[in-house]
Amino acid sequence: MVAILGPLLIGATVAGSAYLGHRFELAHFHILGVIPFGALLIGAAATIGVVLTIWLTSNYDTSNFRLAGQIGGAAAYCAVIFLDFLGTPARAGVVGAARVLGFEHYLAAIADQEAQAIIAFLPSFLQLPPGLQIWTGIVALLVEILGAAVATGWTISVLTGVPFCVTNRRFYSLKGIAESGDLDGLAEWERAIAEHRPIEGRAIFARFHMAGVKPGTREWVRVAVHQCPVCLSSRVRIEPRHRIVGLVRTGRGRDLTLDARGSAAIPD
């Protein structure tokens, strides 16, 4: 389902965000002349397809989903620039090699506009030489593309409930997912966590993970562990799953928040 639904939703939202970004001229909409707010909006809109795929398939923010969103956000921003180029009156009726060369001049003009927007906020005594101005504009364009990609990661993490570590200023990463029908083992592991028995907890969790889900199992649980890569604090999400007429349904889950000591009861 993910293989079919994911590309369709991601492609639709990338195309839609590119079109809307072109219509509302978001490609070079800045705040304070430097913050690429328009690019951030384009990237956030382009990743809605990834978020919908995660929601509809009850999946998680894995590295593949995040990579797909980042590629989609950067592609949407580049598409907006190209649509802006096609929409300029000077390009009407120009075809073939002339249009390709015109696109190069268009990018140079955009880079110059980016540079002028930055120079406008510099002190009057600080003047950039002409050669440095064009490179300033090129760097600004690259920052906007990067901003569109970064916005996708933030959007995925915020809308899918991935915790953010304020101390270390980064989102938790997905450490692992385990599915098992051993409900007694899960309860035993939770007791070990509550009683601060990390060594026993690791052994119990490993046994729980190894139990797996047999083909005929109708009800089981899924445990997803998100962890801060620096302080090792974790958020554990426990969700009930059941099979109805061949379809797997995911029920409402509950979360456990573990500090580094409690996280020691989760195998690496």
Image (spheres, grey):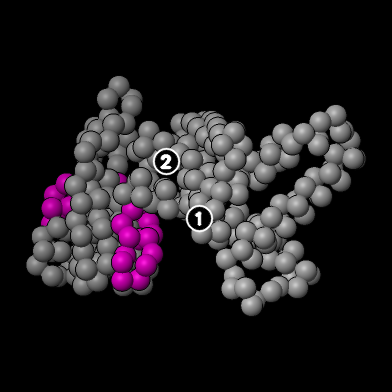
- Tell me what residue is drawn at x 77 percent, y 34 percent: 89
Disc ID at residue 51: 2
- Looking at the rendering, which quadrant does residue 11 occupy? top right
Residue at image point 41% right, 36% down: 52
Say which quadrant the C terminus sits in: bottom left
Please name whichever residue, 48 or 240, is drawn nearer the observer in this view of the structure: 48
Rounded to the nearest whole Å, what is the CA distance between mark 2 and mark 1?
27 Å
- Which residue carries the number 1 mark? 31
In the picture shown, does residue 194 fall above or below 123? above
SS for dot 1: loop
Report helix, strand or loop for mark 2. helix
User: Observer-nearest residue: 157 or 247?
Assistant: 157
Name which residue type carries label 1.
Ile
- Magenta stretch bounds: 162-188
Residue at the image position 71 percent from the left and 52 percent from the top = 110
Q: Which mark is residue 166?
A: none
Magenta segment: does it hold 178? yes
Specify the quadrant of the image occupied by residue 220. top left
Left-right relation of 134 to 3: right
Query: Seen in the image, is 254 located left or right of residue 70?
Result: left
